[in-house]
């Protein structure tokens, strides 16, 4: 199954520290570790879930004191024999211990290979394996909690439940088809259609969690745009609650995009204060305007800022035209100076911190919210659930067209296959490799 039987890698961050942990996994993990870590107790004879004290030896010289945590197959993270060597966090010590492991028969692990082996050995589903990486990459508490929930089967359980239910439906259809002489009326009165409509609703509900799951993992980019001197920089400062952007009464102060992250309802949101958009003879300002348009084009959400108490200028109308295909929020600033309600606009005073929470809520509403922490976390999972939902829709259409349930079974079977892909039950090796290449070394 694997190119090399036993692998090793540093599993803690590189650099100096109190301790470092080197992981060794494979059939000969205990034997190879025993050759490197000398102890009064043989590591190969140690029970699982025990710790052995010893000294690391490189070229017949003691280089460090170590503790070796022993895990025996199949009761380990990877499902194989595993040793985790805890040594002092000296980069030189770590390097020499890994050199010794390699000299004694181990090979360097590839990115994500430990977790990949856990998946291939049935220790976790593919969605749970992906959740391991999401835990490492979590940027907010909510992202962390959601990733842990997925690791514990939060998104796996509903997918498995739906898949097993569809398999039961297929079995019932098969019985009706194989024994017509028994007059088994398994789905009388449109019962199959009702069951499939319920399943489709559940799949559609899962699909709706995808945007928030993606936002939790990767964050959201929000471009603050408008003409000069409408208070975009003041709004950025108010949203992130720090003086990040320079604020003056001089139009065109911002020449480059000023970015800062903040946490909105558990989502890491990167706000970008763009240069005021207008025609300018100033070369530097023109470059800033060009960068603004590029930033707006790539942003997930746009916040258009104008002034309260006046009509939009032609330049502002042009900006709105450019962002109309994106999701955007309309903001009227400076209500402390000119209070004149604009329909569809959030009225704020960035200077006095008035209405800022309403802007944050608007951002959160666009991202979407769900009462559960079970989120579809990435495009692969979303595509699988989407295609399963589409297959169920085809099965419902087949029934509506008056065909027999065994024809609908073809599309139901497709839905089962797609949900299997979501869990990694039926997925090609190339896709598996691409998923684990995103992991860090040592995980």
Image: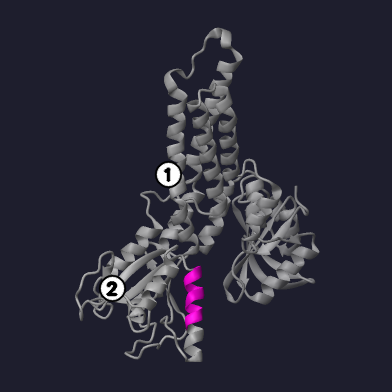
74 vs 369, left or right, is right
Mark nearer the N terminus (2 vs 1): 1
Q: Position of residue 313 (x, y in %)?
A: 33, 78
- Alpha-carbon neighbours of circle 2 within 10 Å: few (<14), some, or many (≥20)? many
Residue at left 47%, top 47%?
Answer: 207
Q: Is residue 294 magenta?
A: yes
Q: Tell me where residue 30 appears, x and y as whole percent.
A: 71, 54
User: Does 318 appear in magenta?
Assistant: no
Do callouts 2 and 1 mark residues in contact (Cβ within 8 Å)? Answer: no
Q: Secondary structure at mark 2?
A: strand
Which residue is disc 1 drawn over? 205
| Rendering quarter of residue 90 | bottom right
What range is drawn magenta here? 289-298
Image quadrant occupied by the C terminus: bottom right
Residue 299, label in figure: none
Numbered label attached to residue 332? 2
In the rendered structure, the answer to whether residue 313 lies left or right of residue 38 reads: left
Q: Position of residue 199 (x, y in %)?
A: 46, 35
Q: Residue at x 28, y 64 (%)?
A: 344
| Furthest residue toward top | 181
Query: Does residue 83 appear anywhere in the picture?
Result: no
Front residue of 17/188: it is 188
Please state which of residues 14 and 400 is positioned toward the viewer in this rendering.
Answer: 400
Q: CA distance from mark 2 to mark 1?
A: 35 Å
Residue under the image location 31 percent in, 75 percent down:
312
Outermost residue toward the front in this view: 314
- Choose top left, top right, bottom left or bottom right for residue 277: bottom left
* Residue 335 lies in quadrant: bottom left
Q: Main secondary structure of the magenta part?
A: helix
Residue 130 image point, x, y percent: 56, 54
Seen in the picture, residue 166 relative to 318 is either above or below; the reply is above
């Amino acid at each position: 199954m694997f190119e090399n039987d036993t692998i090793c890698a540093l599993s803690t961050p590189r650099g100096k520290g109190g301790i470092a942990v080197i992981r060794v996994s494979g059939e000969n993990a205990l034997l190879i570790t025993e050759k490197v870590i000398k102890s009064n107790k043989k590591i190969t004879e140690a029970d699982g879930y025990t710790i052995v004290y010893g000294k690391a030896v490189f070229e017949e010289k003691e280089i460090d004191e170590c503790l070796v945590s022993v895990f025996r197959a199949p009761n380990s993270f990877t499902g194989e024999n595993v040793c985790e060597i805890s040594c002092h966090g000296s980069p030189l010590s770590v390097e020499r211990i890994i050199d010794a492991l390699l000299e004694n028969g181990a090979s360097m692990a590839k990115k994500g290979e430990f977790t990949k082996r856990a998946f291939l050995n049935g220790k976790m589903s593919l969605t749970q394996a992906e959740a391991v990486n999401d835990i490492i990459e979590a940027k907010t508490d909510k992202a962390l909690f959601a990733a842990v929930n997925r690791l514990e089967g939060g998104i796996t359980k509903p997918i498995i439940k739906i898949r097993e239910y569809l398999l039961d439906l297929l079995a019932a259809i098969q019985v009706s088809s194989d024994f017509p002489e028994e007059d088994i009326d398994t789905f009388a009165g449109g019962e199959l259609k009702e069951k499939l409509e319920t399943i489709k609703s559940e799949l559609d509900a899962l699909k709706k969690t995808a945007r928030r799951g993606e936002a939790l993992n990767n964050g959201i980019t929000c471009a603050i745009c408008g003409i000069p001197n409408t208070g975009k920089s003041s709004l950025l400062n108010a949203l992130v609650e720090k003086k990040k952007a320079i604020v003056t009464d001089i139009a065109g102060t911002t020449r480059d995009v000023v970015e800062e992250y903040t946490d909105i309802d558990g989502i890491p949101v990167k706000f970008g204060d763009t240069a005021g958009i207008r025609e300018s003879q100033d070369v530097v300002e023109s470059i800033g305007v060009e960068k603004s348009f590029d930033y707006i084009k790539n942003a997930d959400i746009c916040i258009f800022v104008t002034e309260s108490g006046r009509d939009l200028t032609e330049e502002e109308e042009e900006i709105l035209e450019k962002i109309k295909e994106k999701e955007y929020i309309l903001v009227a600033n400076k209500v402390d100076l000119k209070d004149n309600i604009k329909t569809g606009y959030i009225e704020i005073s960035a200077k006095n911190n008035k209405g800022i929470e309403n802007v944050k809520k608007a951002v959160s509403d666009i991202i979407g919210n769900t009462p559960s922490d079970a989120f579809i976390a990435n495009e692969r999972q979303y595509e699988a659930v989407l295609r399963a939902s589409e297959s169920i829709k085809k099965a419902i259409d087949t029934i509506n067209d008056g065909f027999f349930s065994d024809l609908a079974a073809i599309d139901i079977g497709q839905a089962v296959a797609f949900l299997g892909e979501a869990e990694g039950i039926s997925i090609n090796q190339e896709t598996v490799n691409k998923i684990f290449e995103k992991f860090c070394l040592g995980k």
